[in-house]
Amino acid sequence: MARHGQPSPARKQRKHRFRPGTRALMEIRRYQKSTDLLLRKLPFARLVKELTMHYNNTGLRWQADALLAMQEAAEDYLVRLFEDANLCAIHARRVTLMVKDIQLTRRIRGLSEATR
């Protein structure tokens, strides 16, 4: 038994558990506050280079600033697409984002699936 003023014997502390959905909301708020890039730079650069090789067989070279600008634009497009698709899901009285929400968003914007 511990005396007054002395620490009690070590007890195992349980890890704190958040309610379902709380952790996701914390993560969303963290990403909304940050201005950092969400996609990794090297995989994005490889994808851009692969796509340019597919459409243009000449060995194009990319400056780092050009790749960064492409990544900024791509992330901005994706964030806006998901924001609008989320509004479509909310309009349908759902909280889960589905493929049909993204398809509807693209259709409203005038982007067809054929432009992939």
Image (spheres, rainbow, N blue to C red):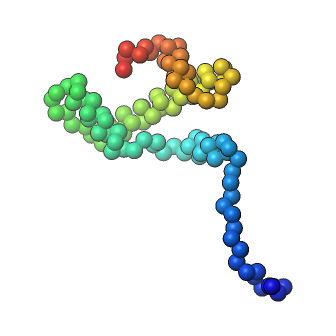
* Quadrant housing the N terminus: bottom right
Residue 98 horizontal/vertical position (percent): 55, 25
Which corner quadrant of the image does residue 10 belong to? bottom right
Residue 65 horizontal/vertical position (percent): 33, 40
Residue situated in front as seen by the camera: 92 or 35: 92
Residue at 41% across, 16% down: 113
Residue at 47% across, 12% down: 110
Left or right, 102 with respect to 13, comes to left
Which corner quadrant of the image does residue 37 belong to? top left
Q: Residue furthest left?
A: 58
Q: Is 6 placed above or below 56 here? A: below
Picture mark count:
0
Residue situated in front as seen by the camera: 101 or 55: 101
Residue at 36% across, 44% down: 41
* Quadrant housing the C terminus: top left
Left or right, 48 with respect to 25, comes to left
Which corner quadrant of the image does residue 52 belong to? top left
Residue 79 horizontal/vertical position (percent): 51, 32
Residue 103 horizontal/vertical position (percent): 50, 18
Left or right, 47 with respect to 87, comes to left
Residue 29 visible, this angle: no
Residue 92 visible, this angle: yes
Q: Is 17 placed above or below 4 here? A: above
Residue at 58% across, 28% down: 97
